[in-house]
Amino acid sequence: MTKLVTWQNFQQHYIYLPELGIALDTSRMNVPDFLPKKLEILFRNAFQQMHNLEEGGIANHDENRMVGHYWLRNPELAPTSDIKAVISSTFKRIQKFSAGIHGNKILPQKASSFQNLLLLGIGGSALGPQFIKSVFISEADKMEFYSLDNTDPDGIDQVMTSIGSGLRETLTLVVSKSGETKETRNLMLEVRNLYKRAGLDFAKHAVAITRVKSHLDRLATKENWLERFPMWDWVGGRTSLFSSVGLLPSALQGLNIHEFIAGAKTMDEITRSSELKNNPAAQMAWMWYHAGRERGEKTMVLLPYKDRLQFLSRYLQQLIMESIGKEKDLVGKKVNQGLTVFGNKGSTDQHAFVQQLRDGTADFFVTFIEVLKFSSNGSLEVEPGITSGDFLNGFLLGTREALFQNGRTSLTITLEEINTRTLGALIALFERAVGLYAFLIGINAYHQPGVEAGKLAAGDVIELSVKIQNHLSSNPKQQFTASLLANALRETEKTETVFQLLLHLAANGRIQKLPGRNYFSAGFQAN
Amino acid sequence: MTKLVTWQNFQQHYIYLPELGIALDTSRMNVPDFLPKKLEILFRNAFQQMHNLEEGGIANHDENRMVGHYWLRNPELAPTSDIKAVISSTFKRIQKFSAGIHGNKILPQKASSFQNLLLLGIGGSALGPQFIKSVFISEADKMEFYSLDNTDPDGIDQVMTSIGSGLRETLTLVVSKSGETKETRNLMLEVRNLYKRAGLDFAKHAVAITRVKSHLDRLATKENWLERFPMWDWVGGRTSLFSSVGLLPSALQGLNIHEFIAGAKTMDEITRSSELKNNPAAQMAWMWYHAGRERGEKTMVLLPYKDRLQFLSRYLQQLIMESIGKEKDLVGKKVNQGLTVFGNKGSTDQHAFVQQLRDGTADFFVTFIEVLKFSSNGSLEVEPGITSGDFLNGFLLGTREALFQNGRTSLTITLEEINTRTLGALIALFERAVGLYAFLIGINAYHQPGVEAGKLAAGDVIELSVKIQNHLSSNPKQQFTASLLANALRETEKTETVFQLLLHLAANGRIQKLPGRNYFSAGFQAN
């Protein structure tokens, strides 16, 4: 069923980038040796559109915005001198601020130095920094990194308990592009309350990363926070790693952000080539197109054989799924596109779900990620001539083969080693593959219209909760079933939601629940 | 396209279990109000087979094994008095051992008490304990929990560095059912080497969890480790949470394992009912059957709106995908079944991939998990009358509605609160849904034949690496291209693998790489 990969075949479908020590192997994707004619035309158009985008064209039509994350790696590309200037000046300010924190020139209110970094953000404002941190975390880190990325009181409690009295040495970054994200606003209110309870002035420990003049920016200005760094409407949250969102936490952690940017810049340059055989991003876009038959019919299982890369799938879930998962194409036709991503790490996942991958539904392709060099000095032989790392490598090669023998395709990205430079390049590789693939299938990769509906519906729920509480406290001794209360509020079509909210309020002791004839006719009243 | 969920409709598709404070809401799955005739017959058979399984029939025919994880919650069900006795005695030994550790009756070699717990295992020997730990981690824990679950030297380094000099206070559990898992063997060798380098005797800090007389068991006996706990061939790795594998780490963490077992036992009892309307496990099996049209055509996106449950999807990936992802059905027909699971947590994932869920490919259904009661005392109002937790709840209800309006179905499991009892019940609920669903679609949920192929292929790779190293060191001054070396080893059909292995060895300084005419004709020789 599956042709064997010969040595010849392998070489033909393998790109090695000596500038970065990164390779892409597509020999197990069962694509033809040459690009089909139809795709040639689509790629010509994709490269042209990518060119227009990089030149500052309005690539995100729905929001009437430019798409400029590539400029962050090479400000010379930016379409205006203002943008060039603000990218460079922001970079310098990030370095200066980080040096000030590390060199104890910027001090907390009641401690001798900032030792902890606490990031408050969600989605594009958290996943990137969390990912970078998890890759490079080491004893050499200049600050201990914490983050809060949800509006869960128990989750907040857990992290803040582990910071404990270290709060006095904690620098808090509040990250929200719009400056109006509810989860992040809640996190800020919860955290500032804890500073207050510890006798500390939040503003003296806080930094805002947000667009200029946003609600958050104005608050930080008014309260004179330690610093404010800008986000721009031409950088999307899911591609904001090379803006302040990613660079400031990385710099504070002590990473080499120059190299991080340089790696991405080099990958950008390589992947501008319209020669497919030299362009790994275009190759990946082709593979996605081929595997999913233009429609995202196959899920991408991401298997980095490297513990430090375990968070990558969460990062890529956002980058890929939020970019590609769209209802309509650029001309408004309903297409319901998508490209699902999941996975953790090999060989661990072999013991979790490779059973299904090999024997079950063939509804996926795998992206293996291999790192050749181990950074640890552990060279213990677990068998004669063989180390633990040899096993890791052997499991990757073996699993790939076992899957391929059963007709399950895969591509492999090899990094000679992981460092800020190669990681920057890896992220750029995926960003550009996403960009090209979106043009191939004719969608806008830079908006997210579907997110709004959930937020609006949540807003309605919150509003209903307020109404319920008000009604109960205005009728203090009266008992209501969900049904009666919905009637009283003239929200009968929302009786179920009323019931759900009553359960939630009662479970948290904010109202009383009294047994009814059955579960659904329980009574509720104010405390 | 999608019918509205009325209050009436909702009540009809909602099961509440007062014994556990757990509810299942299937009102947004678009199933008919009554079970189709065809499924009635399939369910009758499934309940019968589940009954036979619980009575000790050979339910795993391929491996000629009984399937007894339900007995662990109620030893009275076990088919022989030997099994009853060993379950009870093991439980008592777990409690005694944990008490001995906590009460400083069992002491490390050169420290005054055991403070850390280090678990070495992979797949079924790690995911369960890691999950439980992540749900209940708190300041009250009696030991600090670490785990190693991969054969990655850098990953090992990272964890062991964070334990540091705490190794003298570290109890190490080596967990492998077969006692021959290579990754776990490697971990044990790496870790015992570190004990040795710290001047410590590994055996005085080690506990084995494995089947009696396995290689690991014999080693632990010979070296007189602190303790050995049994695994049994009638418990599969992915359902081993209620055996020593899950109970010992939980007891050592300080959790109430009585309640954990009691919760699972209660759920087992409830879900033995052949009345579908009272049986949430059967309802879930029906939903999976319905959503995926008997063929796993839809992915299950798991969205717990609870930070502490973020690891659940990884746990369920193994439980569900390894159980359901099968090539053949019970009569040997090729069916390629599967049920893919992924997800992290809400509302965080809303900012990552709900865009695709709402607008993109409709190739999934969602399982929402809601926890009504917050355990933190944080009741800060972020808006008048509204807490952070109200927002979390609001986002769940809102997102569910926004998805349903676009024809994306979901089911919701509600826990009144998370504790050991409800978590035990939740795990049992999924275990029994898996068991029933497997019978509905006629597959063996208890073997994993597809895992073997990857292991064998990996073994071949390791063997080839040894051959390569031997050949290079036997010909010390000679340079080989991959192609020449493959020839010399008479492995020309494996030239690519030879090349991959040479790259890997060279990257880690174990052989030299010399530039060739092109990347593929690089020369390699011994150091």
Image (cartoon, coloured by chain):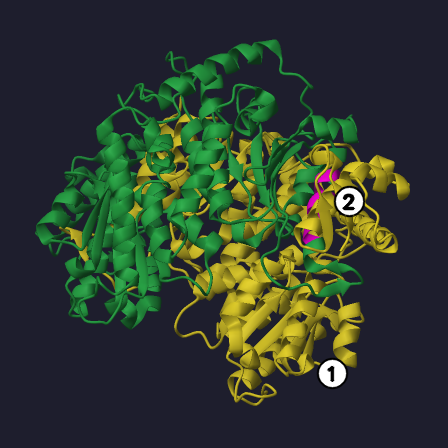
Chain colours: A green, B yellow
Question: Which of these two is toward me, B28 or B185?
Answer: B185
Residue A211 quadrant: top left
Q: Which comes sooner in the sequence, label 2 or label 1?
A: 1
- Residue type (three-letter) at the residue carrying disc 1: Asn
Q: Is residue B33 above or below residue B157?
A: above
User: Within the magenta stretch, is there residue A244?
Assistant: no
* Residue appearing at x 75%, y 41% in the figure: B499
Q: Which residue does the image show at 69% across and 59% down from the upper left?
A: A388
Q: Are marks 2 and 1 on the same chain?
A: yes
Residue B67 left/right relative to A445: right
Residue B345 image offset from top left, x and y in percent: 41, 47
Figure check: B186 above or below A423: below
Image location (x, y in percent) of residue A292: 57, 24
For label 1, the crowd category at 10 Å Cα-Cα, with few meaning under 14, some 14 to 19 and many 20 or more, is some
Q: Which residue is mark 1?
A: B224
- When asked about the image quadrant of residue A179, the answer is top left
Residue at x 56%, y 58% (from the top left corner): B269
Above or below residue B316? Residue B409 is above
Q: In the picture, which quadrant includes the N terminus of chain A?
A: top right
Q: Which residue is mark 2?
A: B453
Q: Is residue A112 above or below residue B65?
A: below
Does the image show residue A508? Answer: no
Q: Main secondary structure of the magenta part?
A: helix
Q: Is residue A399 magenta?
A: yes
Disc number for residue B92? none
- Magenta segment boundaries in residue numbering: A391-401
- Element marked by disc 1: loop
In the rendered image, residue B216, in percent from the top left (x then y), is placed at 75, 70
Between the residue at mark 2 and the residue at mark 1, the CA separation in whole angstroms equals 35 Å
